[in-house]
Image (cartoon, grey):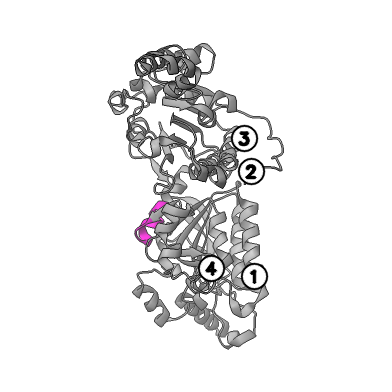
């Protein structure tokens, strides 16, 4: 009986984390506790906690005065919509959620267990970083978490929910995971905090300005999604998970379609302007083609000239990479290339077909882009698409010029099926720019150079920069009407789902970074 009473006492202590006073402070900040978060994330009654009796072993700087069961992180497994997942949630009420030796080992083991079983892992981060009192042991623990995430990368889905701070080197832990969801106003990530920044550079900056959710969702690209509160962040994590399989060997989760696969899309023709220079919103096309209500855009605030999104086509999860003519004409710049490359690799790792929607005038020109490495960053996108072994379908909606045509799902890089609308333009560069180079002497001598330019440009469009010419060369499989887009993509997807690729060759050691 004594042992049973002792067990119950320990359990009560574990449930209270750092104590009622600290829990109240957490609530006062608009934040849930670690256990409250897991209750909302997991199916009711499904959570099984592991290693909840673990405590730190250090006796340095007063740590031995009080030992907290769990050492500031709640770990275990449960279910989301019936699917098994492993989870960990840092408890800020215990030593600020800092990562010590045992804390880090619990997270590492959770990720390892998830990989061993072959199911997703979801981490909820709320930590001040490495535990200073434990010195190098804390740093070693953080490094061990990194190793576990890297080892599991591409094998199981890994989702990070940023519900509080994540500072110092520990900020790389969520960044190494597949999807990062940040809560607005209460979460932030940075390598060096505002005090260090001021000391080193003299700049005065707030926590929010330096590494808040808005910054990482719109400027750095670290956050895939930004949530207004923790409950929305948890809902987003569940939605992301609904598109992903349990592991890299499992089939994607197909749902019963409620949207007819053969549905016509007559409104698409009116979305795309006749003038190739006029902008429009590619998202309008996407929402009409794919299953209604299933499009989930990642990085909606960052590199907005390219769209990356999960969606469903007749119930089957797919990945969309699309140029966005409404922003910067849909050009590919450094951020757009990085955004697309990472998304393509994620989709390829978890067997999700990739559908490219193309309307691209080229790569972003300029000294700034060249000096910052548009060649190096653009190469990432080429590597990612070429190495992807999943079904790859391309639709050329309007413009497809230059090297950007190659990057956006061309047959040269391994696209399985390529469609184009009748109004598509495919060429080395825009017709007018091409004519100015080819006929520069004739234009210089012409009495009316503008009239001659218009005539030659129209002729170039009719003879060279059109999908019929590309189709005659075998580079476009079919020229389709806009209204039949959904049906054509659905048939192509069904034809390619049985696709099998030989074991992948070794990765190149000189993969651009």
Identify the residue at horizontal 61%, vertical 56% (top origin): 149
> Of the residues under marks 3 and 2, which one precedes in the sequence?
3
- In this view, the residue in front, 23 or 61, is 61
Which disc number belongs to residue 512? 2
To which residue does mark 1 refer?
A: 139
Q: Nearer the viewer, residue 179 or 72?
A: 179
> Which residue is disc 4 drawn over?
192
Q: Are marks 1 and 4 in contact (CB under 8 Å)?
A: no
Quote the CA–CA distance across marks 3 and 4.
Answer: 36 Å
What residue span does the magenta drawing correspond to?
227-237
**Marks 1 and 4, how far apart at CA:** 15 Å
Residue 485, x across and y down, in percent: 38, 24
Measure the alpha-carbon separation of dots 3 and 2. Answer: 13 Å
Does dot 3 land on a helix, a strand or a loop?
Answer: helix
Total marks drawn? 4
**C-alpha distance separating marks 2 and 4:** 26 Å
Mark 1–mark 2 Cα distance, whole angstroms, equals 28 Å
User: Which of labels 3 and 4 is toward the front?
Assistant: 4
Secondary structure beneath dot 4 equals loop
User: Circles 3 and 1: CB distance less than 8 Å?
Assistant: no
Q: Is residue 466 visible?
A: no
The CA distance from mark 3 to mark 1 is 35 Å
Point out the tag, 1 or 2, that comes first from the N-terminus. 1
Neighbour class for label 1 at 10 Å: few (<14), some, many (≥20)? Answer: many
Q: Residue at x 55, y 77 (%)?
A: 69
Q: Earlier in the sequence, mark 3 or mark 4?
A: 4
Label 2 SS: loop
Q: Choose top left, top right, bottom left or bottom right for residue 430.
A: top left
Q: Nearer the viewer, mark 1 or mark 2?
A: 2
Residue under pointer 3: 387
Residue located 42% across and 62% down the image: 212
User: Residue 214 location, x and y as percent?
Assistant: 39, 58
């Amino acid at each position: 009986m004594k042992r049973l009473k002792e067990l119950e006492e320990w359990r009560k202590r574990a449930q209270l984390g750092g104590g009622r006073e600290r829990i109240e402070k957490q609530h006062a900040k608009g934040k849930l506790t670690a256990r409250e978060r897991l209750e909302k994330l997991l199916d009711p009654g499904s959570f099984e906690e592991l290693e909840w009796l673990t405590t730190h072993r250090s006796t340095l700087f007063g740590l031995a005065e009080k030992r907290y069961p769990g050492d500031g992180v709640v770990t275990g497994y449960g279910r989301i919509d019936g699917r098994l997942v492993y989870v960990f949630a840092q408890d800020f009420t215990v030593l600020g959620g800092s990562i010590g030796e045992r804390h880090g080992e619990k997270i590492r083991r959770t990720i390892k267990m998830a990989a061993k079983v072959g199911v997703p892992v979801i981490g909820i981060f709320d930590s001040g970083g490495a535990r200073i009192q434990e010195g190098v042991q804390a740093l070693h623990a953080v490094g061990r978490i990194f190793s576990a995430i890297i080892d599991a990368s591409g094998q199981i889905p890994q989702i990070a929910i940023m519900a509080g701070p994540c500072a110092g080197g520990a900020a790389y832990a969520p960044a190494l995971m597949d999807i990062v969801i940040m809560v607005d106003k209460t979460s932030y990530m940075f390598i060096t905090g505002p005090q260090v920044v001021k000391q080193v550079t003299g700049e005065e900056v707030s926590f929010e300005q330096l590494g808040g959710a808005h910054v990482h969702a719109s400027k750095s690209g670290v956050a895939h999604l930004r949530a207004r509160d923790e409950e929305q962040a948890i809902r987003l994590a569940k939605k992301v998970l609904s598109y992903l399989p349990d592991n890299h060997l499992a089939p994607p989760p197909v749902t019963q379609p409620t949207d007819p696969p053969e549905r016509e899309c007559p409104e698409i023709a009116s979305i795309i302007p006749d003038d190739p220079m006029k902008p429009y919103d590619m998202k309008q096309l996407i929402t009409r083609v794919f299953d209604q209500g299933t499009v989930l855009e990642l990085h909606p605030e960052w590199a907005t000239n390219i769209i990356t999104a999960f969606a469903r086509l007749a119930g089957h999860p797919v990945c969309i990479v699309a140029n966005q003519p409404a922003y910067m004409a849909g050009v590919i710049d450094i951020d757009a290339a990085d955004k697309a490359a990472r998304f393509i690799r994620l989709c390829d790792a978890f067997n999700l077909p990739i559908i490219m929607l193309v309307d691209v005038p080229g790569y972003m020109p300029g000294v700034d882009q060249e000096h910052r490495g548009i060649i190096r960053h653009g190469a990432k996108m080429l590597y990612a698409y070429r190495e992807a072994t999943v079904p790859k379908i391309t639709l050329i909606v309007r413009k497809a010029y230059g090297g950007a045509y190659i990057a956006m799902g061309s047959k040269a890089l391994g696209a399985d099926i390529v469609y184009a609308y009748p109004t598509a333009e495919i060429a080395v560069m825009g017709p007018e720019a091409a004519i100015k180079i080819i006929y520069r002497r004739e234009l210089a001598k012409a009495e009316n150079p503008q009239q001659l330019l218009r005539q030659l440009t129209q002729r170039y469009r009719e003879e060279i920069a059109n999908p019929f010419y590309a189709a005659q060369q075998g580079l476009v499989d079919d020229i389709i009407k806009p209204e039949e887009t959904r049906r054509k993509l659905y048939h192509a997807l069904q034809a390619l789902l049985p696709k099998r690729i030989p074991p992948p060759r070794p990765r190149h050691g000189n993969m651009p970074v």
